[in-house]
Amino acid sequence: MPLRILFTGGTGKAGRHVLPWLFSQGYDILNFDLKPFAHPDIPTLIGDVADSGQVFNAMTCHFRTSALKQGGPPGPVDAVVHFAAIPRILIAPDNETFRVNVMGTYNVLEAAMKLGIRKVVIASSETTYGVCFAEGDRDFHHFPLEEEYDVDPMDSYGLSKVINEKTARAFAARFKADIYALRIGNVIEPHEYARFRNFVQNPSLRKRNAWSYIDARDLAQLVHLCLQKDGLGFQVFNAANDTITADQPTAEFLAQWCPGVPLTRPLLGNEAPLSNRKAREVLGFKEQHDWRNELRAVPPTRS
């Protein structure tokens, strides 16, 4: 029997690529979202993660009417992937962004733990590093950005993600569960690689993203690796591709664009400032979609 996965927020920018990829790996998936996802084999249950009762029901329901043939109610799902959130600032008022993101994650984790589900993957964010949605031109404390960094966002979205990581840590400790938080970088869909020409020509555009990114399909691979890796308790992983979005070696580039920001270790070659070293070493992540290769496949636009 394939693993039954509840995926919250699968209709969003990342989810619409992650869901089909996970399905191709053999998972049975129920999407739980405010809006449906148009996929013939992945049903959507319309619901709100900010409502704890709806979350509980989503984890304990049939995925499709054909399951009624089994003659009894389903047990809880095998694992949960939680991506549902207000995805950035300035979509909803700050207090609503904080409420939905924090309470939504609490509801998901509480329901999963009390139902005996011991594997949850949650979406954290690069915004926890404090520059993405900062007021003014703020520098990072140091490079590379790794999981032990002193995260200090000043915005409601980044703050909600810091709180969610702390919530996940608490539930993992209490219930002896595996809860992995992915600090997801700037998500790039396949059709968006033409933008990288402008990124390279105008480096200041990418400072808030630490000149890093995650291909949506490589993010799917990371989620899969998290679902397959057991026994780590609470963990944070940067979800980023391997290389900097610049045409200079990383150390040279950062010396020019972030003078005075220290390095905590040597940055060799084109290593991304938002480092995925832990994901590579612990989970075995291997990127499949380097932006340089993807960009070569995109014809230049004519002026």
Image (cartoon, rainbow, N blue to C red):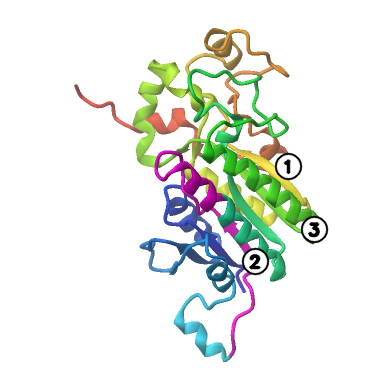
**N-term mark: 3 or 2:** 2
Name the residue: 35% across, 40% down. Answer: 191
- Find the distance from the CA under tag 1 to the CA under tag 3: 23 Å
**Residue 61 visible to the viewer:** yes
Q: Residues within 10 Å of mark 1 (few under 14, many from 20)?
A: few
Residue at far bottom of view: 71
Residue 251 pos. (x, y %) = 61, 13
Tag 3's secondary structure?
A: helix
Residue 116 place in picture, x, y as percent: 72, 69
Label 3 crowd (10 A; few <14 / some 14-19 / many >=20): few
Q: 275 or 155, which is in the foreground?
A: 155
* Residue interval drawn in magenta: 72-101
Q: Residue drawn 50% across and 60% down?
A: 24
Q: Quadrant of residue 111?
A: bottom right
Amino acid of disc 2: Ala
Q: Which residue is drawn at the image coordinates 60% and 30% (left, top)? A: 129
Q: Tell me, yes or no, whether the highlighted magenta stretch contains residue 76.
A: yes
Q: Is residue 168 magenta?
A: no
- Reply above or below: 246 against 113: above
User: Along the horizontal axis of the image, is 55 left or right of 281?
Assistant: left
Q: Residue furthest left?
A: 303
Residue mark closest to the camera, 2 vs 1 = 2
Q: What residue would you read off at disc 3?
A: 174
Q: Which residue is mark 2?
A: 111
Query: CB atoms at circles 1 and 3 under 8 Å apart?
Result: no
Quadrant of the rendered structure where residue 70 is?
Answer: bottom right
Amino acid under disc 3 = Arg
